[in-house]
Structure formats: structure tokens, C-alpha cells
Amino acid sequence: MRRSSGFVNWEQFLLLAPVTILLLLAFALPLLAIVPEAFGGDAAGRFMRIFDSPVYRTVIWTTVRISLEATVITLVVSFPLAWIWSRATGVKALLLGLLVLVPFLTNVLVRTFAWLAILGQHGLVNATLLDLGLISQPLPLLFSETAVGLALVNASIPMMVFALVSVLRRIDGRILLAAHTLGANPVRAWIGVVVPLAIRGIQSGVTIVFLFTMASFIAPAFLGNQRQQMLAQVVQSEIDIGADWALAAALGITLAVVATIIVTALSSGARYLSRWQRPGLVPLTLPQEHVEQADTSLLRRPVELPPSRLHILAGFRVGARLVEPIYLCVISVFILLPLVVLIPVSFSSAEVLIFPPPGYSLRWFETIFGSQEWIAAALTSLRIGAATCVATLVIATLTVLGFGRHFCYQRSADALLLSPLTVPSVVFALGAYLAFARVGLVDTETGIIIAHTVLIFPIVYLVVSATYSSIDHWLSLAAASLGANPWRIFRTIVFPLLLPGLGVGALLAMLLSFDESVASIFLSNLSVKTLPRKLWEGIRFNTSPESAAVSVVLLGVTCAVVVIGMVVVLGRRKNALLPVQPHPEPV
């Protein structure tokens, strides 16, 4: 294929036109639509009302505090898992990948709803404590800041791990051995060596998780109370009841500004901590006679440690062997428990969420599969997911081909393409609602497809771009030298080699669109109800095991798609490693 020099010609212009239109009309304009709505009329009075009111100030402070707490806890909990996964191979690496991937692709509504079955008065925790005789009556675990924090941390762990593991894999594990030989204990070696080298991954993970928690309204809506309201929850409530769109827009701008300020501060701190990774040239100022008098025999002298030091190091080694399996068991239970506990609850014969169930029945599955509303919602989500999948794949492929391999503004272009990931989803959903309402796209499948495409395109683009960069460009040059035109080169060489990445991107796009909750809740109402919207209403107004049955079906579909995708990828990789059998020469 043709190389790109940085100057956009007509061929590139046509290839990059779809993504330009998508980002301008479906992403930038909705964000700009918030501004006139928020600053129209009595804008000063509106913002004064927000910052002068003790209620709104408390909501802003609560949002920032809970988001920072959840982000810090997620980082501390996820860092060891990311490190272990970055060093794992074979079956262990596959299992750890599934441990992170399955919850990541599971609907956030499903994971949040599971905490109702875990922390409820008749939930898993209270039932276990009662059976053990540790308490005499159920504890009020729900509708508290602790419950909200647990749900946010549980939902954020996969995102933090994915951000960390790519950086940790590039760190040479022998640096820890070098640190030990220089006298550093394991804790000091980790904090002084590994953490600074992973600061870029930490910065990315902290930014992603903080923006996710700042924009979260599902967890506080289900698990919190009026004293733990978060800003996104208030924005969603204003839009849902249609009470004051201007106030909702002003709150959305407040959320975006506060998030930007804090993310900028966190990024500045990360740059300060990583400043030693970019050292300047320091001139050698030692006199020559000092260099000549250096005792080089020290380099050949064995390091002698006192017996007490040897005992401490031996104790650290034994402890490290025990800590890793214990940690993996605890973190696996914490990640998977909200998904596993839904399975017995969905088969419950009770009318409310009780764990363990008093009896088992298929009544709730019969209810949802016999309900025209649930089936219609599932079909709507399937249509939207299929359309989003096709749109994101086509736009991502055209974008990758348009940039080529040597686009001199690639970093700036990637920053623009990935910008939907840096905006709180509730802010974009608010802008999409305000902009789409003016052109009749609210409560339509088309509007939801456009919003899903904007949110999911960056992820699909990353997958397709990584696959394209791994293709040997000499194959295209060889085909061009033999007279093949660009279309034939793409059809016979590039596209077949790009197909595995397109397949992975298609699976991700389908699952993410099917499970996307924020835009679906904002943009769907009466005429169009997606499965997340229907599940949102079911959980808000009915906590029966019916919602658990729907959640288990969604979880089963997600697991099936993930397993099928991994089987296909591993099968192709196995076939690629098989030796080519020589053809027998004709006699």
C-alpha cells in the first residue's frame, strides 16, 4: 500500500472523511451543544446556584472524594495482578486473561445488580455471618458509601489492569534481582524501581478509572443513598424527569471542568515522578587522577551479607511464594463473586432477592423468555449492536488505511481519535441527548447507533491499527512491483492479513454495544428500549430474581462469545506455527 508523508492527498482525504465526519458531527457538536444550553438565559444565576448551594457543593465534594478513593484503591489492588499477568505464560496467562476480560465485557448494570444480592439484608454476606453466629440480625450494608465504593472498585479493576499490563511487560524482570543484590528489600525494590518504571501505565490507568468513576451514576443510584449522591447521578436524574435541561447542562459542564482539573493535576504529578526517566547529559567532572586511582578490585569481590540479612531475604522469598497464591485467590473471588452469585439467585423460587435461595425454579427464565418486552429489547440491542459493529469496523479500517504507515502527525491524530475515551461518558451522553433532540434522533435506533459508534470506535481502531502495523509492508511493495493496483493489493494481501484483527474488533464492538448502558439509558425511553434500558428500569422498580435471570443470560452470552473468540484466535495461531509440508516433485 502507498506510504503517507504527512500531507493529505485526495485519496487520503476520501479515506479519512468518514472518521472526520463522525468526530465532528457526532462527538464535537454534541459536546458543544451543552455550552449554549448551560450559558443561555440566566447563566450566572444558574452557576451561582450550583456553587452557592450547600447541597450541590456536597454532591461535588462527594463525587471527587469517592472517585479519588476508588481510583487509589483500584490502583493498589490491581498493580500486583497486572504484574503477575505480565510475567505469566501458558495456561496461567490464559486464565488470568479470562479473569480480567470476562468482567470487563460484562454489563456494568449486571455487576452492580449483583451487589444487591451480596450486600442485601437477605444477601450472601449477612446470610454467612448469621449462619456463623457472628451477628444476631442483618447488618445495613446496602445504601452506603462502602457499597458504592466496592461496586466502583470491582468495575474498575479490569480497566486498570489493561492499562498497566502493557507497560509492565516491557520491564525487564531482572531489575528486581539487581536491586536485591544491591541490598534493597522486596518492598523497597518495588516502590523504588518497578513503580517508577510503570509510571506511564499508572498515569493512563488512573486517568481512565477516575473518569469512569466520576461519570458513574449506576452504582450510586442502586447502592447509595441521598447523602452519597454523585454528580453524574444528579445529571441523569434531571434529564430523566425532564425538569431542567439548562441546569443539567450546567451540572455537566461542572462535572467536565472538575474532572479536567483533577486529571491535569494527576498528569502533572506523574510527569514529575517520571522526570528521572529522561535525564540530560551530565558531563564527567572528576579529575583524571581520581579515575586512575579507582580500586576496580571491588567489582570482583563477592558480596558478603551478614547472617541476619540472609535470614531476612530467605524469609522474604518464602513469604513471596505464599503471598502470590493467596492474593490471586482473594482478588479472583472479589472480581468473580458478583458474577457467580447471580447464578443461584436467578434460579430462586422466592419473590425477592434471597441468598441462599429457599428453593430452585426455572420460573424467572420462563418469565423473561415468554415476555414480549424482554424479547423486543433484546432484538433491539442486537440490531443496534450489529449496525454499530459494521460502522465501527468500516470507519476504523478506512482510517487505518488513510493514515498509512508513515504519517508524521500520527501522535496528534491518535490523540484526536481516542478523545472519546477521555471525556466522561455521562457528559457525552448529555450532549448527545441535547443535540439529537433538535434533529429528532432521541429515542430512535439511529441515534443510539451513532452514539455507540462514537464511544466504541476508539477501541476498535486500536485493535485494527495494531493488526495493520504488524503486517509486513514489503508484501505490498512486492505486489505493487508486479503491477497490482492498490485495490487488488488490499483485496488479496492486506485484507486477509487484517482479518484476525477485524474479527477481534467485531466481537468487541458487538459486546460493548450490547452492554453499553450510559448512552442507552440517556437516549432511549418509550419508543426504543434496549436491553440495558429495560434492565435499568427492572432493577430500579423491581428487585425480583427476574433481573438476575436476565443478567445470567447476558453473562452467558458474553462468556460464550469470549470463548469462541479465543478458540478462533488460538486456532489460527496454532495453524500459523505448523510447518509447511513440501509438495512432492513430479517424477
Image (cartoon, rainbow, N blue to C red):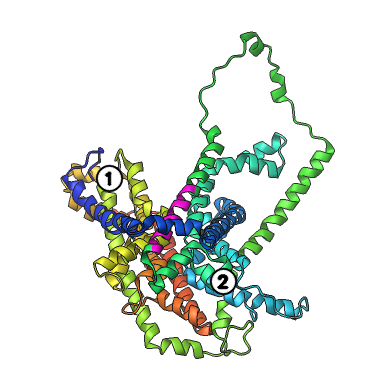
Amino acid, disc 2: Leu
Residue 266 picture location, percent across and down = 52, 45
Name the residue located 76 percent from the left edge and 77 percent from the top edge: 135
**So how many labels did they put on this image?**
2
Amino acid, disc 1: Gly
Picture layout, residue 360 above or below residue 151:
below
Left or right position of 32 against 127? left
Residue 214 picture location, percent across and down = 49, 58
Q: Dot 2 corresponds to which residue?
A: 223
Residue 112 picture location, percent across and down = 53, 71
Is 204 part of what is drawn in magenta? no
The span shown in magenta is 247-261
Picture layout, residue 511 above or below residue 129:
above
Spatial CA distance of label 1 from label 2 is 48 Å
The image's mark for residue 404 is 1
Name the residue located 71 percent from the left edge and 25 percent from the top edge: 300
Name the residue located 38 percent from the left edge and 68 percent from the top edge: 244
Q: Secondary structure at mark 1?
A: loop
Name the residue located 18 percent from the left edge and 42 percent from the top edge: 9
Q: Nearer the viewer, residue 458 or 246?
A: 246
